[in-house]
Image (cartoon, rainbow, N blue to C red):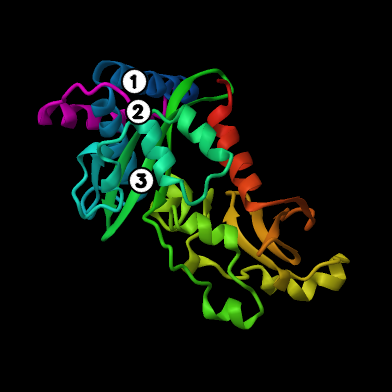
Amino acid sequence: MLPNIGIEANQQKEIHLKLKSFFQNSKLDFMEQLKAYYNYQLELVEKHGREGLMVFLDTETQVYVDGENNRSLEIMHYSDVPESCPWYKLHLLPRDEAIRKTWEKFPIEFVDSLEKYTLDLFAIFEAEKWYLAYAYQVKDYDGNVYYQFLGGREPNSDAKLPKDLMKAGWKMPEDLKELYSVHGNFGNLKGALRNQLSHCIAAAEKLETSLTFLEDKIEEWELDYSFFDLLPFWEDDAGNCQNFYKPEAIENSYATVDWDHETKEVSGYSTLAEFIDYQFGRTLREDH
C-alpha cells in the first residue's frame, strides 16, 4: 500500500488544474507533452503517495463521467469506506489480502498478477453504485512509466441473462456468473464506469447478440458459423470483440472466441478465465 501524505484543498485544486493543462498547447509536440504528463503523475505519487494518486484518479474520472459540473462521483481509499460500501469488510486488511478476499469466489490465475502489481485500491461511489479501482503502473512503447486503473462494479451474485438471450437458447455461463459475484462488470475503469463493453467485460444487462444484423452476409462471406451463436461480452475500440460461442459448450459455460471485424473470422478458443488473464493480467505483467 502506498504511503499517505495529505494534500490540502488548495493544493488539490492546483494539481487538478495542472493535470488538465497538459495537451492544451497544440503548438507543442504531442509526445513531449505526453512524456511531461506521465512525469508529473510520477512526481505526484512520489511526493504524496496514495493521496497524490487519488487526486490523479479524481481528475481522470471527471472525464469518465461526462464532466465536473454534473458528476456525483466520490472517491475514497478502501480503508476509509463507510459500512454501506460492499467492500467495507476489506477496510482493515492489507492490500494483498483485500484483493484475495475480493476475488475468493473466482480464484483465477489472473488474481496472482492483480495482487502482485496493484499499487493500491480505491472505492468509487457514482450514480448510486459502488466500484473498486485497482491502480497500477505501465510503460508505453518509449519506456515512459505512467498510471492506469482497472475497475469493477459492486458484486451482482444474482445476475441473470436478459430474457431475449434465454429465449434464444443461451444459458448463463457459470464462470461469468462467478465473475459477477466479484464484480458486476470488470476491466478498464473508463469502460466500467460508463457501463460499456470497451475494454471491459460487460454487465449482465448489457449482454446481447449484437452482431446478428450481419446474419444475412453469411453466404456472401462464406462463413461457417452463425452470428446468433456469438455473444459479445468485451470489445476493443477497433470493431473487434470477444464472444461466448454457443456450439462450444464447456463445463457449464462456453468457449470464448475472438471475432475479427476485418477478416470476419472467429479464432482463439479459450475459457473466460484464460481471456481475463490474457487481456488484463498480461497488461499488468508487461515490462515488470
Q: Residue at x 66, y 64 (%)?
A: 252
Which of pointers 3 and 2 lies earlier in the amino acid sequence?
2
Across and down, in percent, residue 269 comes to 75, 52
When the figure is inspected, residue 91 is found, relative to residue 128, above or below; the finding is above
Measured from the top left, where is residue 123 in percent x and y? 29, 44
Picture quadrant where residue 72 is located? bottom left
User: Is 145 displayed left or right of 265 in the figure?
Assistant: left
Vertical placement of residue 258 versus 188, above or below: below
Numbered disc 2: secondary structure: loop
Query: What residue appears at the point 38 percent right and 35 percent down from the top-left corner?
Result: 97
**Callout 1 amino acid:** Tyr
The answer to whether residue 162 is left or right of residue 38 is right
SS assignment at label 1: helix
Mark 2 is surrounded, within 10 Å at the Cα level, by few (under 14), some (14 to 19) or many (20 or more) other residues, namely: some
Q: How many marks?
A: 3
Q: Quadrant of the N terminus?
A: top left
User: Residue at image x 46%, y 55%?
Assistant: 185
Magenta segment range? 1-28
In front: label 3 or label 2: 3
Instruction: Indicate which disc residue 219 carries.
Output: none
Mark 1 Cα-neighbour bin, 10 Å: few <14, some 14–19, many ≥20: some
- Tag 3 or tag 1, which sits nearer the N-term? 1
Q: Which residue is mark 1?
A: 40
Residue type at mark 2?
Answer: Phe
- Residue 20: x and y, percent? 30, 33
Residue 268 within the magenta-colored segment of the rendering: no
Q: Say which residue label 2 marks.
A: 22
Q: Are marks 1 and 2 in contact (CB under 8 Å)?
A: yes
The answer for how far apart the CA atoms under marks 1 and 2 are is 10 Å
Q: Which residue is mark 3?
A: 132
